[in-house]
Each structure stands twice: as C-alpha cells, then as structure tokens.
C-alpha cells in the first residue's frame, strides 16, 4: 500500500519537473534545457508514468503470488521500491539534460 501511495505522489510530483530547470526562454538554442521541448518532456513524462504503473502492478502481483505460495514477501516489496527509486532518478536525469 505504501508503494502505491508513493507512486501516486511521484506521478504528481513529476508533472512539476519542468519547474526544476531555469526558464525556457523564448527562443530555442543549444543552451535551452531539453525539458523545454514539449515533445521530449511529454514523451519522458508519459514513459515515466508507464514505468511507475508497470512497477506497481508487477510488485502487487508478485506479492499476491508470494503470499499464495506462503513464501516471503518482503524481497518483492523492497525490489519494487528500489526499482521505483531507480526510475525516478532516470526521470530526473533525463529532465536535466
């Protein structure tokens, strides 16, 4: 449940990633951040949301299967959280290009 809540928060925070850079300015040049390109920003943002959604669903399914088989669940939970953190770092690296 905590991962689901965290994923929702990260999804909302990612919308405001465009404000993490300097002003986009009025003209395009090599010094304008990549996040100012609306196509690039949209692609990365949608890709990040898809990655978060896949991670949440995969983690929940793995936890249910582990519970049904009476095996330990915590590795799936930790793995889901770690992969979510990695996806978030990749997202912010791509936004900072």
Image: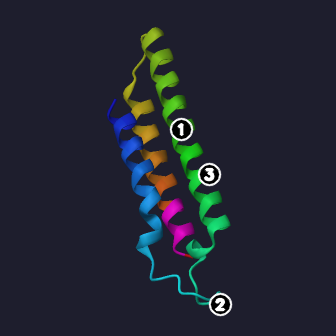
Are the two marked residues, 3 and 1, in contact with CB atoms closer than 8 angstroms?
no
Residue at the image point whose x is 46% and y is 83% from the top: 23
Q: Work out whether 67 lies above or below 19.
A: above
Q: Please name the colour scheme applied to the rendered image.
A: rainbow
Residue topped by disc 1: 53
Find residue 54 and report its horizontal and vertical position in percent: 57, 37
Residue topped by disc 3: 47
Based on the picture, tell me whether residue 95 belongs to the magenta stretch.
yes
Q: Secondary structure at mark 2?
A: loop
In space, the residues marked 1 and 2 are separated at their CA atoms by 34 Å
In space, the residues marked 3 and 1 are separated at their CA atoms by 10 Å
What segment is highlighted magenta in the picture?
90-96
Q: Work out whether 47 lies above or below 93.
A: above
Based on the picture, tell me whether residue 27 belongs to the magenta stretch.
no
Residue topped by disc 2: 29
Q: Is residue 78 left or right of residue 31?
A: left
Name the dominant secondary structure of the magenta segment: helix
Q: Secondary structure at mark 3?
A: helix
Quarter of the picture holding the C terminus: bottom right
| Of 32 and 90, the residue lying toward us | 32
Counting residues from the start of the chain, the first of labels 2 and 3 encountered is: 2
Counting residues from the start of the chain, the first of labels 3 and 1 encountered is: 3
Counting residues from the start of the chain, the first of labels 1 and 2 encountered is: 2
């Amino acid at each position: 449940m905590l991962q689901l809540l965290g994923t929702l928060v990260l999804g909302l925070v990612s919308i405001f990633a465009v404000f993490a850079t300097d002003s986009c300015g009025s003209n395009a040049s090599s010094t304008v951040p990549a996040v100012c390109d609306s196509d690039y920003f949209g692609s990365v943002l949608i890709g990040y949301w898809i990655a978060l959604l896949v991670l949440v669903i995969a983690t929940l399914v793995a936890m249910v299967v582990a519970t049904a088989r009476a095996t330990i669940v915590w590795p799936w939970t930790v793995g889901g959280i770690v992969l979510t953190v990695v996806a978030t770092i990749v997202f912010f690296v791509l936004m900072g290009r």
